Amino acid sequence: MWLGVAATVGVALALLYEDSYQQDGGTHFLFARWGWQYPVNFVSVWGRPLFTFLYSFPAHFGYPAAKLFTVVICLLTAWQTWRLAEQLKFERAELVIPFLFLQPSFLLLCADTMTEPLFALVFLLALRLHLSGRVAAGMLVASLLPLARPEGFFLGVLWGLWVLFDSRGGGTGWRQTLVRLPSTLLLASGMFLWWLAALLITHDPLWILHNWPHEWRPEGGQYGSGNIWWYFHKSSEIFGLILKVPFAVGLIVLLWRRRFITGVSAFVLIFVLHALMFIRGSFGSAGYPRYFVCVAPAIALIMLAGWNEIAGALGKYSRLAPAAALTGIFLLSGLYSLHYVDGMGFVRDAWAVREMYQWFQANEAARRPIAKLIWSQAYMCIIFDRDSMEKPIFSGDRERNLAMLRESPPGTLVFWDNTTGPGWHGIQAADLEAAGYVRLRSQAYQFDGRFFSFVWQGHGGLWSQEMHLFYKNPPGEVTRAVGSH
C-alpha cells in the first residue's frame, strides 16, 4: 500500500513539475541524453559516470522518461529500505516507506534527474549485503559510490573501517585487522573501472585529474560558505518539520543501544563532512539540504526506531493514541513536504520556457531556421531537443562570453532568461542586442505554485521571471521583434 501511494505521488510530481528544481538536474539529463554521441560524457567528473551511463537509456526517450526512471529508483530504494528494516527486526517495518518519502528533500528529488537518489540506492544495496554477511559483495557494490557522487570517496573510507573492525567472524584484534586489510582493495574497484574507461575513451591516463571541476577547490568555493549551525538551521528541509522529533529520539536510542551503527555512522559522516566543507567553502559544497538524500534510507530507519519508542510510550496511555498521533504526523508532514516542493521558484521557469517554445513554433513570423541554439537554462535546450554541445562553454567572464556570442554564426537562436543568464554569465538581454542579435520576443511571467500561493518560513509565494528569444540574421537581412510584453 505504501509503495502504491509513493508511486502515485512520484508519477504525479514528474508530470506536474516538468523540469528540475535546479539547473543541475537538466544538465545531468543532457549529459545522459547525448552520452552515446559524446562518449566522454560517460567519464565526466561533474557528470558522474554511473548516473550518466544508467540514465542514457531512459534519456533516449526524453526528459519525462528520465524523471520517471528516478521514480522507479526511489521506489526500489523504499522497498529495499523496508527489507532492511525487517532484516534489522525493527517493529512496524512498513512505516519506513512513508518516513523515507516524507523527508522534504527526498520528495523533492524523487521525480527529478539529480544524482542523490541513485547514490542512496547503491548505498542501501551495498549496506544490505554488508549486514547480511556478504562483505566482499558489499564492498564491490560500495565501490560504485564515487561514480555516483563525490561523497562516495569519503563513505568508501568509512566502509573500509567497518570491514577492518567488524566484530563478526573472528573478532577485532590487530591480527584479524591485518588479515582483512588486503580485501578492502575491493573498495577501489569502481574507481579502477572509471580510470580504465576514461583511458580507453580519452587516451589520457590523468583524465580524472584534468577533468576535475575548477570550482571544486579545498577552500574559497564560488558557492559561498556558512557557519557550523547551517544544517541545523536547514534540518526541517532535511528531516521534515515534525519528523525531526522521531529522528532525534531514534538517533539517541540507537547510539545508546549500539544498534545500526553502520547507518548511524554513515549519516554522521555526511553531516559532519558537508558541515565542515560548507564552513570553508570547500569542493563546491553549497549548503544544499538535498545532499542528505544520499543517506535518506538511513535517516528513515533512524526515524522508524525513534517512532517505535514514541509509539510504545503513547501506547501506555491509550491504544488509539499511537495511531492518532501517526496519522496527524503523516498528514502535517505531507503538507509541509508538498509545500516545500511546490514552493521551489526555479521549477516554475519551465512553464515560461514551454510557453515561449510553443509561441516560437506556432508563430510563422518568428519561426526561422536554427543553425545553433544558445541557452541560459538547460530546459531550453531540452525542449528544443538540440545537441547540447552547440552552446559555447560560457563562464563568469562576461567579456569572453560576449566575444563568443558575437562570433556565433548567422542563424543562431538565443533563448535567455533574466535570472540564470545574468547571474551565471553576466549577460543581460540588452547585451544580446548590442552583440548583433535581433529581439524576436520578450515576455514577463508571474507564477504561483500548483497548490500553494503563500510564503512560509521564507519559502514559496509568487515567482517572477522574464524570457527572451533573440536571433542572428544573415548579413543584410532585417527582422523586427514580433511579440514583446
Image (cartoon, rainbow, N blue to C red):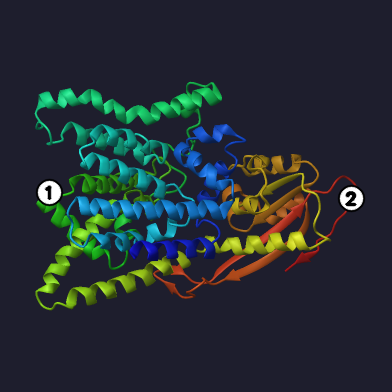
Crowding near pointer 1: few (<14 within 10 Å), some, many (20+)? few
Location of residue 101 (image quadrant): bottom left
Q: Position of residue 279 (x, y in %)?
A: 34, 47
Q: Is residue 167 left or right of residue 463?
A: left
Nearest to the observer: residue 274 or residue 106? 106
Query: Which is more foreground, mark 1 or mark 2?
Result: 1
Distance from label 1 to label 2 (Cα)? Answer: 75 Å
- For image coordinates 25% across by 50% down, the residue present is 84
Q: Quick one: label 1 or label 2, which is nearer the N terminus?
A: 1
Q: Residue furthest right?
A: 476
- For image coordinates 29% across by 49% down, the residue present is 271
- For image coordinates 72% across by 69% down, the residue present is 485
Q: Is residue 51 left or right of residue 476?
A: left
The disc label shown at residue 258, or none: 1
- The amino acid type, in three-letter code, at marker 2 is Glu
Q: Position of residue 316 (x, y in %)?
A: 9, 74
Rendered view: 386 above or below 5:
above
Rendered view: 224 above or below 178:
below
For mark 2, what is the residue? 477
Q: Secondary structure at mark 2?
A: loop
Rendered view: 238 above or below 33:
below
Nearest to the observer: residue 455 or residue 225? 455
Rendered view: 66 above or below 483:
above
Residue 403 visible: yes
Contact? badges 1 and 2 (CB < 8 Å): no
Residue 288 visible: no
Q: Quadrant of the N terminus?
A: bottom left
Nearest to the observer: residue 340 or residue 425? 340
- The amino acid type, in three-letter code, at marker 1 is Arg
Q: Position of residue 143 (x, y in %)?
A: 34, 34
